[in-house]
């Protein structure tokens, strides 16, 4: 496991203060990167600005950059910081939604950048600029913490300790062959729509390569005005999501017009108590999620479980091994009169369209020594790699459109219609690996 860029122990104090320190901090920033002239109203950021709690912002996790000054007439675009390796920039922020604007480009050379936030949430796919060309991109990003009220906090798993999603700062990862970062602006976005995600390892923001889930890919598809608040965690069922007070957390910050997407089933299937089962505890809890969200003025959306890769090779068909759970979710959606995204059906179509062999390319199937410390082959038919997660996020986007949700108007215009029966080519997503990787599979199956 490669964690050389991260020091989890450094996060322990922040996690247990539940956001108190960040709550008193600033919420708006304008940063001008580089050693040249500084644009009016901006704060200069030099390569020496290493993150510290005292400073409240800076380059983080031992990543470094260099400064280049092109001495252009535009103070904001005439200089920048750059690196030939991924680098992180963090800013202390209280919980909430923020509009984050980055300016990228170089007066003299081509640039190429991918931007992720927090625990590998995809914001910007590989984006290139020609010499003298600049791009300015704005994203609405959710920052969350554990605090529910003065006495209650979310019960985190040990694997979540040190996770960027749960600390008291915004962390941006700049990753590309030639990243040139000119400027960064941050402003609160209190009126943004929040889309809360409740789910398991197929939804969560996976921290480490090569694991990924659709919840960390879907921010890329939204224009400013919508923030994705991913509260999913690996290994959870509806019951354990409730038991760790995650629904309490969501409801504590939900406002009218926000959404709650709920996808469970993989781990609920393994619960074998006398009152468990698809049409018993699973149905009852799913109804509870829906009704509680409605009480807050929220808009619930039920998502059926992603199918596991489970082929009958003689027929080329992917066989359902989630029992009655997808059917139970469909029935709850119908009975409660809420939107349904049938991800189970769409992912089954997707895998069958890829075929028995090529479908492995959507999952964590890698030969030994693909990643540092990986002595054995990885062969997981439940958890996705970035390509698979990206394709499934596209399925969710199609579900949003099919249900004519109000979110549709916030979808980016560069998204062509997607048919899971005709998946993208395997090289469609040009993914720049983040520095962290692990051979340990996420909880749950």
Image (cartoon, rainbow, N blue to C red):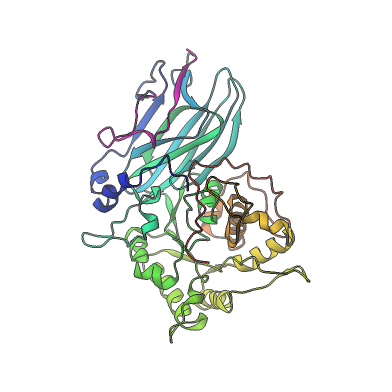
Image position of 133 (left or right of 254): right
Q: Position of residue 289 (x, y in %)?
A: 42, 71
Q: Is residue 94 visible?
A: no
Q: Quadrant of residue 100?
A: top left
Q: Nearer the viewer, residue 384 or 26?
A: 384
- Is 60 inside the magenta-drawn segment? yes
Q: Residue at x 46, y 62 (%)?
A: 234
Q: Is residue 157 visible?
A: yes
Q: Position of residue 133 (x, y in %)?
A: 58, 24
Q: Position of residue 208 (x, y in %)?
A: 49, 49
Most extreme residue toward the right is: 314
Q: Quadrant of residue 88?
A: top left
Q: Residue at x 67, y 45 (%)?
A: 428
Most extreme residue toward the left is: 150
Most extreme residue toward the bottom is: 274
Q: Which residues are magenta?
A: 47-71
Q: Give the prevailing secondary structure in the magenta stretch.
A: loop
Q: Quadrant of residue 51?
A: top left
- Is 270 inside the magenta-drawn segment? no
Q: Is residue 68 above or below residue 235?
A: above
Image position of 96 (left or right of 354): left
Q: Nearer the viewer, residue 268 or 261?
A: 268
Q: Position of residue 331 (x, y in %)?
A: 55, 78
Q: Residue at x 41, y 16 (%)?
A: 36
Q: Residue at x 69, y 58 (%)?
A: 359
Q: Nearer the viewer, residue 14 or 392?
A: 14
Count the numbered circles shown: 0
């Amino acid at each position: 496991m490669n964690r050389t860029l991260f020091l989890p122990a450094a996060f322990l104090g922040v996690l247990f203060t539940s956001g108190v320190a960040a709550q008193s901090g600033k919420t708006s920033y304008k940063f001008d990167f580089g050693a040249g002239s500084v644009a009016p109203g901006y704060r200069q950021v030099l390569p020496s600005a290493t993150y510290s709690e005292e400073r409240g912002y800076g380059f983080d996790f031992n990543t470094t950059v260099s400064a280049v000054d092109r001495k252009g007439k535009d103070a904001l675009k005439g200089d920048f910081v750059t690196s030939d390796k991924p680098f992180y920039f963090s800013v202390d922020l209280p919980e909430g939604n923020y509009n984050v604007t980055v300016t990228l480009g170089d007066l003299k050379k081509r640039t190429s950048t991918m931007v992720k936030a927090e625990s590998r949430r995809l914001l910007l796919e590989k984006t290139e600029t020609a010499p003298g060309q600049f791009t300015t991109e704005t994203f609405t990003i959710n920052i969350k913490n554990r605090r529910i009220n003065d006495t209650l906090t979310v019960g985190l798993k040990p694997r979540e300790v040190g996770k960027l999603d749960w600390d008291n700062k915004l962390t941006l990862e700049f990753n590309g062959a030639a990243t040139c970062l000119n400027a960064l602006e941050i402003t609160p976005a209190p009126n943004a729509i929040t889309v809360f995600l409740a789910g398991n390892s197929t939804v969560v923001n996976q921290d480490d390569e090569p694991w990924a889930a659709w919840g960390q890919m879907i921010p890329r598809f939204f224009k400013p005005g919508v923030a994705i608040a991913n509260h999913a965690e690996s290994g959870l069922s509806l019951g354990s999501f409730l038991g760790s007070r995650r629904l309490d957390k969501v409801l504590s910050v939900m406002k009218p017009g926000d959404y709650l997407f709920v996808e469970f089933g993989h781990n609920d299937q393994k619960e074998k108590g006398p009152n468990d089962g698809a049409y018993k505890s699973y149905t009852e809890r799913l109804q509870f999620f829906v009704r509680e969200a409605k009480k807050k003025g929220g808009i619930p959306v039920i998502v059926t479980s992603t199918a596991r890769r489970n082929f009958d090779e003689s027929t080329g068909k992917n066989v359902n091994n989630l029992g009655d759970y997808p059917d139970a979710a469909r029935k709850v959606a119908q009975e409660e009169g809420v939107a349904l995204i049938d991800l189970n059906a769409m992912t089954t179509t997707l895998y069958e369209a890829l075929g028995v062999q090529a479908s492995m390319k959507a999952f964590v199937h890698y030969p030994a020594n693909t990643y540092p410390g990986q002595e054995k082959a990885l062969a997981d038919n439940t958890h996705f790699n970035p390509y698979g997660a990206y394709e499934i996020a596209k399925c969710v986007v199609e579900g949003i459109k099919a249900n004519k949700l109000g979110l549709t108007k916030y979808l980016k215009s560069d998204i062509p219609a997607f048919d899971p029966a005709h998946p993208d080519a395997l090289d469609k997503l040009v993914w720049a690996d983040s520095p962290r990787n692990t051979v340990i599979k996420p909880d749950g199956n």
